[in-house]
Image (spheres, rainbow, N blue to C red):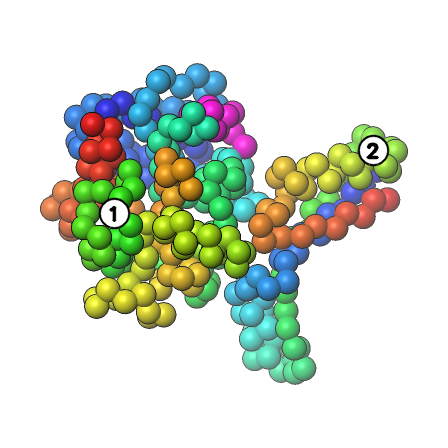
Amino acid sequence: MKARVHITLKNGVLDPQGKAIQHALGALGFSGVEDVRQGKYIELDLLESDPTAIRENVEEMCKKLLSNMVIENYTIDIE
Amino acid sequence: MKTAVVTFPASNCDRDMFDALEKITGTKPYAIWHQDTEMPDVDLIALPGGFSFGDYLRCGAMAARSPAMELVMAHANRGGNVIGICNGFQVLTEMGLLPGVLMRNRSLKFVCKNVNLKVENNTSTFTNAYQRNQNIEIPVAHHDGNYFAAPNVLKKLESNKQVAFRYVDDNNEPTEGANPNGSQNNIAGITNKAGNILGMMPHPERFIEEVQGGTDGRGFFESIINSLK
């Protein structure tokens, strides 16, 4: 099965890269972009087929390596 | 004083650190590879600058999970001294040995220049050879040195006097203009609460001899020697 992990910056954490993207979009004529927050997307192919076991396992991965809990949140989608 | 320098794939300041430690302590440091599972008994472990593991995922994230880091963790938990310079600072935050995180520079640009630092606290293991509030010149060279911590963590760092060095201008003031990377409170280096671990973005090991352009980094290493006497 596949697990898709989105890693995003927590609210309140400044995102200079997001700001730069926002400015670049404005410069290209895309108006009305009020804010941009950028993050990471990680796709995992897993041997395990039990969604509950996968979620537990991927949660551990997120906490131990994939995200830095000081500044980042993560969401996990399994299919 | 016995020291060890840990090298990761894509460390690039490990030789400078080696050289500085050997010249100032008079003893050759032990060279530790990130996959090593044994560490000699030392007074200080240094995590050098560089771009360990290509800065993949997050700066220092992979290095922090290297086998040798279990030895560093055990040494630190016994009260042993650990320093992390630049990438080493990022590794220490990723290991959870120091609070906060080093984010992408506010300018989004790699910053490579000499900066002025104020010695905020000269009572620590790593700063006692300096005068309090002394203004020193040390080089920085990084892309991700923008120190961030949650407001309550930042407050504790300040009230516990854990801020070792701050970016300042020529008048010793922590101004916006003197801040090379957007760090909160112009923080350049911090210690843990117990005071045996220090992380800093600037490179004292690059400023120990006149030929390098300055010697203000010597005091950093001399402080550690003093504290072991």
User: Which span is picked out in magenta?
Assistant: B65-75
Q: Nearer the viewer, residue B167 or B34?
A: B167
- Where is B171 relative to B23, above or below? below
Q: Is residue B114 visible?
A: no
The quadrant of the rendering that contains the C terminus of chain B is top left
Q: Is residue B150 left or right of residue B163?
A: right
Identify the residue position indicated by label 2 in the image: A53
The picture quadrant where one finds residue A28 is bottom right
Q: Residues within 10 Å of mark 2 (few under 14, many from 20)?
A: few
Q: Nearer the viewer, mark 2 or mark 1?
A: 1
Q: Is residue B217 magenta?
A: no
The picture places residue B171, in percent across and down from the top left corner, at: 21, 68
- Where is A28 relative to B64, above or below? below
Helix or strand or loop: what does disc 1 sit on? loop
Identify the residue position indicated by label 1 in the image: B122
Q: Nearer the viewer, residue A67 or B41?
A: B41
How many marks can you see? 2
Q: Which mark is residue B220?
A: none
Q: Residue at x 22, y 52 (%)?
A: B132
